[in-house]
Image (cartoon, rainbow, N blue to C red):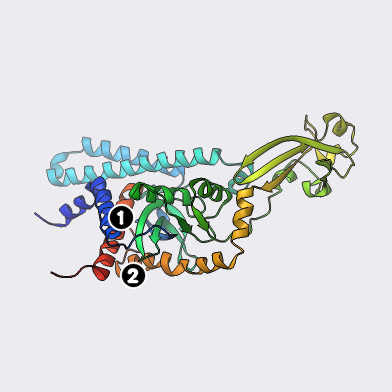
Amino acid sequence: MVNYHTLADFRVAHQSELDELFAQVLGVLSYHKLITLKRVMHDGTKIKAAAADKSFRRQATLKAHLEQARQQVAALSEANVEELSARKAAARKRALLDKQQRLEAALQEIEELKKNQAKQSEEEKDKDKAKEPRVSTTDSQARIMIGAKGAFGPAYNVQISTDAKAKIIVGVGISQCSSDSGELVAAVQRIEDNFKKNPEQMVVDAAYPTHDAIEAMAQKGIDLIGPLRDRKQTSFDSLKRRGIALQFYPQASSYNESTDSYTCPANNTLHFETEEKQKGLIKRRYRARAAQCRACPFQAQCCLGSKKGRSVLRQQKSEVVLAFEAKMKTEEAIKIYKERAGVAETPNAWIKDKFALRQFRLRGVVKVGIEAMWACLTYNISQWTRMCWQPQ
C-alpha cells in the first residue's frame, strides 16, 4: 500500500540505488552533450535542519536528560500496565527509547567535537576557549550556521558542483562546517567518482581558494579560478600570554637577505634553523643562540622561561600560490569568474524556490544527504526534460 510511511521509508532506504540512478542520469545528459566538464562552477548553500535553536544542550545537561529518560523507561516497565492499554504502553515506550537514543547520539557528537577541539592549533584554541560545545537533542549532527540576512540557526551546508555548459549538477555533498574553505577537494573527488575523470577547470568564490586547495588543484592538473581573500594577520594573543613586550614582537626583527638571518631589537642575530612546507607556504624558522638570550638584558621582555633562544618564523608563499595569484590578475580569469554566479547559484535557486527545500525533513548527515540527492536528481531530470525530451 502506498501511503506516507511507505514513501518515507522508500526515500531513505535506497541510498546506493539513488546514487547509481543519479550517475546514470548524468550519463544520459552527457550523451546529449549537456555535460562537458570543461568548466565546472562550485558553490555551497545553507539549508535549515529539522531542529530548533533551543534544542542545543551542553554535555552536563545531556547527561542529566539521558539519566531521566532511562529512569522513565524503567518506571514504565515496572508500572501497572493494566492502567494502560497495551497499545498506549508500547507507544510510550517507543517514544522514550527514541528519546534515549537521540540523547546518546548527542553525547557521542559532543565527544567528537571535543576531540576536534583538541586537534586545533593554539591560536584556534585561544579563540574558542570560552565556547563549550553544544549539540541538538533532535538532530545531533546539525550545526549552528549563519544563513540568509545574517540569521543564525541549525543547518547543513549543501555543496553543489554545476557544469557550465547547461547548468547541470554534476556533484552534491553535505558538510557540517559553516565555512566553505575546506570543501573544494571533496567536491572534485565526487565529480571524479561520478565521471571517472576530473573537470578541466573549477570556478569558485573567495572562500574556496585556500593555499591547500590551490596546491591540491595544481597536483590534479585542474585550472582553478577564484579570488584570493585578504588573509587575516596572525593573532599575537599567545605572545601576550607569554609576557612578550610589543617592541619584541616578530615584526620588530629585521631580515638581512644577504646573510639569510634576522637581527632582533637587542642586536642579536637569529640564524636559519629549519624549513617546512605547509598549506601552500614555505615556513622558515630562525633562532638566536640560547647563551645570547640568557645574557641579554631584555630577556624578561622577549623570551623569559624559554630554554632555547628566541625564534622568528618567516612565511613565504609557494611558487604554485604565487602563480595562481598572478593568473587571477589577468583579464581572462576575471572575465571567467564573473560568469560564476549565474551558473553556480541557479541550482540553489531552483532547489529552494521551485522545490521548496528550505528546510530538511530528515535528520542526520546520511539522511539529509539522501534528501539533497533527491532534489538534485529532480533538478537534473527537469533540465533534461526542458532541453532535450520530446514526446514520441
Q: Secondary structure at mark 1?
A: helix
The residue where tag 2 is placed is: 353
Q: Residue at x 33, y 65 (%)?
A: 351
Tell me where residue 78 sits by quadrant. Answer: top left
Residue 124: image x %, image y %?
60, 46
Q: Is residue 102 above or below residue 203?
A: above
Identity, as a three-letter code, of the amino acid under mark 2: Asp
Nearest to viewer (mark 1 / mark 2): 1
Compared across the picture, whether 144 is left or right of 302 comes to left
Quadrant of res 304: top right
Looking at the rendered structure, the secondary structure element under dot 2 is: helix
> In the image, what residue occupies the spot 87% across and 45% down?
265
Quadrant housing the C terminus: bottom left
In the depicted structure, whether residue 73 falls above or below residue 331:
above
Judge by depth and name the residue closer to the eye, 265 or 39: 39
Judge by depth and name the residue closer to the eye, 253 or 364.
253
Q: Is residue 7 left or right of residue 104?
A: left
Quadrant in the picture for residue 65: top left
**Label ID, residue 373:** 1
Asked if the residue under mark 2 is in contact with the one under mark 1, i.e. CB atoms within 8 Å, the reply is no
Q: Where is residue 181 shown, x and y percent of the image?
A: 52, 53
Crowdedness of circle 2 by 10 Å Cα count: few (<14), some, many (20+)? few
State the quadrant of the N terminus.
Answer: bottom left
Is residue 64 in view from this perspective? yes
Q: Residue at x 34, y 68 (%)?
A: 350
